Amino acid sequence: MGIVVEHLCKRFGDFVAVDDVSLRVERGQLAAMLGPSGGGKSTILRMIAGLEKADSGTVELGGARVDHMHTRDRQVGFVFQHYALFRHMTVEKNVGFGLSVRKVPEDEKRARVNEMLKLMNLTGFEKRYPDQLSGGQRQRVALARALAPRPRLLLLDEPFGAVDAKVREELGRWLRNLHDELDVTSIFVTHDQEEAFSLADKVMVIAKGRLEQSGQPVDILDQPATEFMARFVGDANVFDSVVRDGVALVGRVAVPVRGFEDGSAVRLVIRSYDLKFFKQEDGPAIVHRMLYLGDRVKVDASIEGAGPIFAQFPRRSSLLRGIEPGCRIGIEVTLARAFAKP
Amino acid sequence: MRPALTPTSRWSLLLRGAVIAWMLLLVVLPLVALAIHGLRSGVPFFWAAITEPQAKDAVALTLWTALLISLINAVLGTATAWLITRYRFRGRRLLATLIDLPLAIPTLVTGIMLVVLFGPMSPLGAWFEGHGIYVAFHSPIIVLALGFVTLPFSVRMVQPVLADMDRAEEEAAASLGASRLVTFLRIIWPSIGPAVLGGALQTFARAMAEFGSIVVVSGNVPHETLTAPVYIYGQVESGDSHGAAAVALALVTLSLLVTLFSKLMVRWGVRRHA
Amino acid sequence: MPDLAASSKRPPPWALRILVLTYLTIFLFAPLLALGVESFREGALSLWQGITEPESLLALRNSFLLAAIAVVLNVLFGIAAGLVIARQRFWGRALLDGLIEVPLALSPVMVGLAFILIFGRTGWLGPWLSQFGVRVIFSFPGLIIATLFVTVPFTAREVIHVLSEIGEEEEMAATTLGASRWQTFWHVTLPNMRGALSCGISLTAARALGEFGAVLIMGGAITGSTHTATTWIFTAVDERNNGAALGLSLVLGLCSVALLLLVEKLRARAHERR
């Protein structure tokens, strides 16, 4: 079931949490809402579920307007950030709750609960209470509970926020597989870029209550629509310069820029992996430090007359040959994004 | 965040109305009755009623005994909280439970205990009397009774704050060369101060209100051992509700102010602590 | 009480031990012990006769009946107050929350007086009610009102505290799963209140059994009619009826200690659960 959100707005007092957001997710997609915390992602998710009332705008689920529909009638599975498991019910009762309240016959319910527990690798935990489970297990119970009534739509609010890094990665992969097995449309909220880009079919970046950009992960990575996007994704160096003959100078480093007239002031955003450093006696920059980060090396340098710049290389990269703190280097910018200076 | 889950439906309005009505009838109405009766013959009458010699002495006795026990509890209650939170010893849990006992024991039963202990018929009472110290039916026993009923307040107020305190702060101070006194004054006191004061205020309010234990132990001699609540009880018994209402109004106002202040104190302490 | 990781393994210093021990002995242990010793000296037979004489039985019956009524009404009010104060947002919510605690700050004597001013012979509602043959003062309804006033904070406070601490997410989760308002309350909210309600019930019962000042004034301690356990102890002391006074004191004391221990147990369990 597809989701179409049009011109959604929400204020809390003076604070504008969601500012005219329109987005769509196609049936069967796994979409990520990515952005800094406090940017309004969760609020949008809650408005889609009907847990929060929008000030204006519309929500369509499967082609039907649901704005005036109560949460309980929207048939949305929702996984809360801190799971919100019913603490006085066993795992079994938790998972079966959505079926009980809809008066599903007992044997059908039991079969479905067992099926879900099996799917979630929770067999054997039926009689446990939430406080007797690990974070990852609670997470899976929350998912099982949300999926048991066969929702058309699955919404997950920071689903892996409360588990540690390793479990997080595992659960992520597992969510992707699960999504592919079930006929469901999903949106998950996250502030973790890696999670969003590696799991989702579609990434929607939300910041300060606005939708900055949405699209396939590759497009968002390679074609940032705004300066914010260019700086938000990955680690970036930022320089201000002026265009002359299709080139912007950063110190003595020439950066090719297209699409700007001569004399226009531009802001350049250069990702740390879109750079090449090489040893050069009279080079325009000096290396200060080299940080060995496991499989990568981060090199801190400064361009004379322009300021600090950093780049990352694979540990054994030939680009690093001969480079050491204190030496002069030349810099080649393989890809830079230029935006009109605000 | 305001959840759409609980929109103001008819049911929630009904429930809210019921709760408000219950509080109005049970709590607000009596307060209003006291205020109106206490002031109904005007401020001069109100003033005359509370400055009438017997009333004045009763209020004075209540205030100074309450103040005394607040000070005692502030110091010794804090010491008790310190002992319970900072050290391990046998019987620690039992002690922690015993400290709560006065919350449960009827105050009248407290009075009986004290009469049994210090009454002129008791060995201890007789011994004291033989040495010219009069405990029962004199002011010392009022303080003892107040001490029993208010015992948990200071301890229970200071204890959680002490327990939550980060020992690392003290260790840091010590590592920087601070003496124990300086550590206490600059590190510990700023944290527990509000709780100590809040506990003292709570003790004060509770002590001012005490009736059950005192009416049995103090002898209730006007101008000497007649406390304000017992005075009010006497006035009501003899049919002078108006005079009683004036004194009651004054005390109730004071109690509410002290309680409010104690709550603010605690909240302030919590905020600073966080 | 939780065991505190921060507590030191060192034994407490002697000065602190002696200070705290002296404080607790004077104000807490000695009176408790005195009641035990005196009851023992009085002898089991005399105590038993005191407890089983008709007036004592009537007083005990009244006290337990009042406690039961207070428990039932306060459970209902506590649930309603919890749902309204911890779950609804409206103007004046904080004020309502504060009002619930007001009875803790007031002297029962002043409360009794205030209700006399309302329901007494010359009070606001007294004459009007007497037209219908309803008498509040010096009769059982008066005892009920007095008991309700002093017990109103206990259950409500526990429920409000627990509901605010737990938050609304579980209820929202129930709604997303298709539960109706009633289903959510019955299957999610109410079970979450269970611990708070048990605590509240015990505290309410203890407070109701121990109430003295307000029931003394409102009930008038009329022999054969409005005596409660506490007012009958008071009268028995006056009449030098030691068996009844000590016997009932012991019964009340033990009941309240049992209830207190129950509360501690419930709290400890709630703490573990979290």
Image: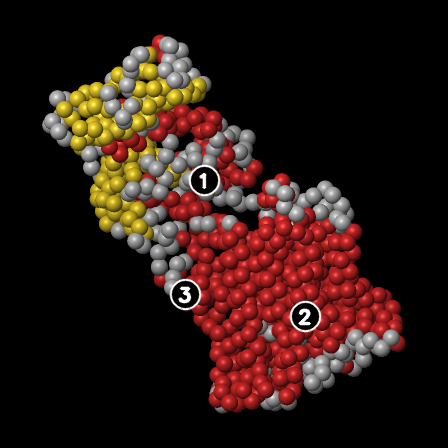
> Tag count in the figure?
3
| Chain of the residue that carries numbered disc 1 in the rendered image | A
x 51%, y 38%: residue: A91
Same-subunit check for callouts 2 and 1:
no
| Chain of the residue that carries numbered disc 2 in the rendered image | B
Task: State the SS at label 3.
Answer: loop
Name the amino acid type tagged 2: Leu
The answer to the question of whether label 2 and label 1 lie on touching residues, with beta carbons closer than 8 A, is no
Mark yes or no: residue C219 visible.
Answer: no
Q: Which residue is mark 2?
A: B68
Q: Position of residue C75 (x, y in %)?
A: 54, 62
Name the amino acid type tagged 1: Tyr
Rate crowding at label 2 as few (under 14), some (14 to 19) or many (20 or more) other CA atoms within 10 Å.
Answer: some
x 73%, y 77%: residue: B139
Task: State the SS at label 1.
Answer: loop
Foreground: disc 2 or disc 1: 2
Q: Position of residue C274 (x, y in %)?
A: 56, 45
Foreground: disc 2 or disc 3: 2
Q: Which residue is mark 3?
A: C92
| Chain of the residue that carries numbered disc 3 in the rendered image | C
Rate crowding at label 1 as few (under 14), some (14 to 19) or many (20 or more) other CA atoms within 10 Å.
Answer: many
> Relative to residue B146, is residue B168 depicted above or below?
above
Residue C261 relative to residue C31: left or right: left
Name the amino acid type tagged 3: Gly
Q: Nearer the viewer, residue A229 or A198?
A: A229
- The colour scheme used to paint the residues is secondary structure
Task: State the SS at label 2.
Answer: helix
Q: Nearer the viewer, residue A7 or B87?
A: B87
Same-subunit check for callouts 1 and 3:
no
Q: CA distance from mark 1 to mark 3?
A: 32 Å
Q: Which residue is mark 1?
A: A83
Residue A219 relative to residue A318: left or right: left
